[in-house]
Image (cartoon, grey):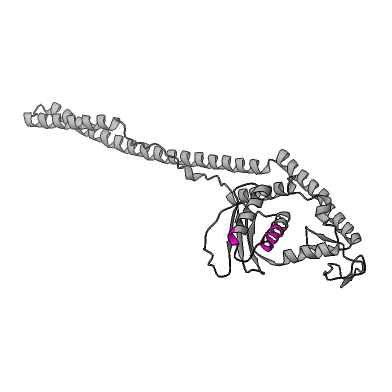
Amino acid sequence: MFRAKHGIESPLAYSIASCKRPCRALCLCCQQYLCRDHLKEHDDLIDAKLPPLVDQINTLSDQLNKGTSLESSCITALNQWRDNAHRTVDQFYERKRQQFEELIQEKRNRQKQEVIHIGSNVSELIRGQEATKEQIDSITDYVRILEQDINKFEQNQFVLTPLVIDDSLISIRQDAASHGLLSSTTNSADSILSSGNHPSARQKRNIGTADNVFSKSIKLNRWEIEEQTGITDTMRINILSIISTTMDTHDRSATKAVARDVKNWLDGTYGKSWTVEIYDKQEHQPQRNITSSKYFQVKDTKFGWTILMFK
């Protein structure tokens, strides 16, 4: 228990147990209750984290502008693949050429032997002067067949099939998960830095009386966050505060009116096209697969409502 500014005991749980000074503020960034001095130290510690981020960003920028190691290594691997592919084609060509030359040599040797053999037979018939018509006709037929065989062999002996390159031999990987992470991170950063969502110094510290801080704490503590995507800390606090205020102005049966008012506020504050659905504890919430850049589902412990918001 801590004493507030006017000596009234404060019911707030102080984040620094050893501090005896009264709690004066709630830090919206990390939900810590702090005195004025510790708030200043806490704020300075948060601000001190920015210069190292600048150095890290500059290092990444230099790496992108000057560093070509990734591109160089990929191109080197691609060139090596090309050299290996050329070597494979050359080896295939040499093997087929050798097979063809061996086939040619074998066929030519056999044809030469046949020509020598038939020539020897004709010379023998000439010397003996005893050739018959049947022998001459037989030799003539053989010579014609041999001539056809030689001429046919001299024609193209290849059946060439064009080399077809399968595009899947080289796959360029698109890292969708990384792209989605960068996109989501960029959207979150843009949301934080935009003029409508970026808290002022006073809003960031939420400087006020202990009673105001305690009231804010009650509104936030009634919620159980079940799932969220693309929702910044500032957005979450603002949304829960508005929903709490809106619900407190209606009775427990006015789920449609609350959903309408919250949607109108979301459309006006964070851009149009929001969807807001509310289910009380008696209603069955349908199972759906929702793909959205901003998704927020919370449960209210006071009314027992489940509230789903997405854009």
Say whether residue 257 is left or right of residue 91: right
Residue 248 belongs to magenta span: yes
Visible residue check, residue 218 = yes
Residue nearer the viewer, 12 or 55: 12
Residue extending furthest toward the bottom: 1
Say above or below: 186 vs 209.
above
Residue nearer the viewer, 193 or 209: 209
- Magenta stretch, main secondary structure class: helix
Residue extending furthest toward the left: 133
Q: Where is residue 70 in the image (x, y as percent from the top left)?
A: 65, 44
Quadrant (top left, top right, bottom left, bottom right) of the N terminus: bottom right
Residue 170 belongs to magenta span: no
Q: Position of residue 261 (x, y in %)?
A: 64, 55
Residue 207 lies in quadrant: bottom right
Q: Which region is colored magenta?
A: 241-256
Count up the numbered dots. Answer: 0
Residue 277 lies in quadrant: bottom right
Visible residue check, residue 120 = no
Say whether residue 16 is left or right of residue 99: right
Residue beneath the point at 70% across and 60% down: 245
Q: Where is residue 302 in the image (x, y as percent from the top left)?
A: 67, 69
Say above or below: 72 vs 49.
above
